[in-house]
Image (cartoon, rainbow, N blue to C red):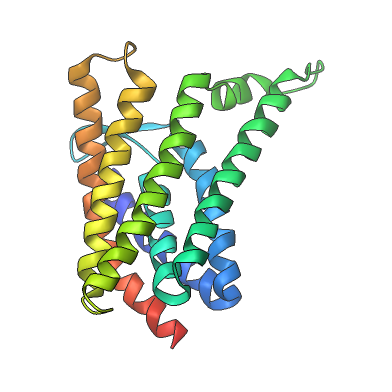
């Protein structure tokens, strides 16, 4: 069931990304990056089994940011894509600050959500910092690598630059985040297993997002 839901989520998320671009153009992509970054940091708290292996959610939303920045490079240039990465960084920092402030408030006797919020928002500082740092570095690296490959192929072979930049940066981000956030908490074997599964899923997602990149280019034209 989770495997089916994964592909359903890919189609829905990437379709919503294209709809956001069509409705709001470049500004819609900026909006998407901020929303997806915050939601991905919520989803990543949930562990699931996919293809018989354990991983976290959030992979599709995190990957949608790579698609969004690739579209920005393709349609609007490197400068606008970098702006999108910085907006995503700003969004997740605001999210972390506001959620931590929320936890400091003392609930009253009729409150029903405080314990759930503690579980969801009470992330260890190390995990939060690792997530923010790796989001920023991996997405910025993707922007530069995609743009370099675009120049190398003279604007042709879009599917090659999309898959190379997304897969490399997404997988490196995945491994770096797991080891920065969970070293000393999980065994090395468990961390490698989680990172490998996450990277495998992200490779599948990267391949699936290629048609959506071509559709985004058609929307522009």
Q: Give the residue displayed 47% in from the left and 43% down from the top.
A: 40
Percent x, y of residue 34: 57, 52
Q: How many marks?
A: 0
Quadrant of image for the N terminus: top left
Percent x, y of residue 211: 29, 72
Q: Is residue 159 left or right of residue 12?
A: left
Percent x, y of residue 170: 30, 47
Rendered view: 214 above or below 54: below
In the image shown, does 158 or 213 lie closer to the viewer?
Answer: 158
Q: Is residue 51 left or right of residue 38?
A: left
Picture quarter containing residue 190? Answer: top left
Q: Is residue 156 left or right of residue 129?
A: left
Rendered view: 37 above or below 28: above
Q: Is residue 160 left or right of residue 124?
A: left
Camera sees residue 67: yes
In the image shown, does 124 or 19 lie closer to the viewer?
Answer: 124
């Amino acid at each position: 069931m989770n495997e089916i839901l994964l592909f359903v989520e890919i189609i829905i998320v990437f379709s919503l990304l294209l709809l956001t671009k069509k409705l709001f153009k470049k500004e819609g992509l900026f909006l998407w990056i901020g929303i997806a970054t915050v939601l991905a940091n919520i989803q990543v708290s949930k562990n699931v089994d996919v293809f018989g292996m354990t991983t976290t959610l959030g992979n599709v939303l995190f990957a949608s940011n790579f698609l969004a920045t690739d579209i920005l490079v393709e349609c609007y240039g490197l400068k606008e894509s970098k702006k999108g990465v910085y907006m995503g960084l700003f969004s997740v920092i605001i999210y972390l600050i506001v959620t931590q402030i929320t936890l400091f408030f003392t609930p009253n006797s009729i409150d029903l959500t405080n314990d759930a919020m503690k579980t969801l928002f009470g992330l260890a500082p190390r995990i939060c910092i690792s997530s923010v740092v790796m989001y920023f570095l991996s997405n910025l690296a993707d922007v530069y690598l995609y743009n370099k490959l675009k120049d190398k192929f003279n604007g042709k072979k879009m599917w090659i630059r999309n898959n190379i930049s997304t897969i490399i940066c997404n997988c490196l981000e995945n491994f770096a985040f797991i080891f920065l956030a969970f070293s000393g908490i999980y065994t090395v074997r468990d961390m490698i297993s989680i990172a490998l599964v996450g990277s495998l899923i992200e490779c599948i997602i990267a391949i699936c997002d290629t048609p959506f990149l071509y559709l985004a280019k058609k929307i522009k034209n």
